[in-house]
Image (cartoon, helix red, strand yellow):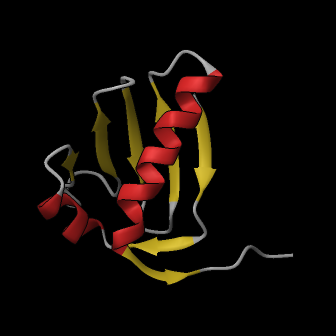
Amino acid sequence: MVSADLHATIDLYALSKDVKAVDYEPEQFPGAIFRIAEPKAVIILFKNGKMICTGSNTEANIKKVLAYAAKVLSKYVLSINPPAK
């Protein structure tokens, strides 16, 4: 398991409508579930850009999953939130 912060606000509604691999039901849970087939992993993504990645077993696979997720998510960024110093 790995956690990451994109330092961005993400439009989870639009993401879930456009990307079939994403489930988002805010009435039940505040995060979107992004299931990635290859390499197999699941990302729990929150509107504030924080995410948790599970299911990947090697550092190389985690890097691939996070790179793929960042590419997909880049289209759904509402605003950039610079990290606090």
Taking depth in this image into account, of 2 and 73 the one nearest to the observer is 73
* Residue beneath the point at 32% across and 73% down: 11
User: Height in image: 56 above or below 8?
Assistant: above
- Residue 1: x and y, percent? 57, 28
- Residue 6: x and y, percent? 57, 62
Taking depth in this image into account, of 28 and 47 the one nearest to the observer is 47
* Residue beneath the point at 21% across and 69% down: 13
User: Height in image: 31 above or below 35?
Assistant: below
User: Height in image: 33 above or below 10?
Assistant: above
Taking depth in this image into account, of 70 and 78 the one nearest to the observer is 70
The total number of labels drawn is 0
- Residue 66: x and y, percent? 51, 43
Is 2 positioned to the left or the right of 20 in the image? right
- Residue 31: x and y, percent? 35, 54
* Residue beneath the point at 19% across and 59% down: 16
Taking depth in this image into account, of 55 and 70 the one nearest to the observer is 70
Q: Quadrant of residue 74?
A: bottom left
Residue reaching furthest to the bottom: 79
In the rendered image, the quadrant that contains the C terminus is bottom right
Is 85 positioned to the left or the right of 16 in the image? right
User: Height in image: 73 above or below 66?
Assistant: below
Residue reaching furthest to the top: 57
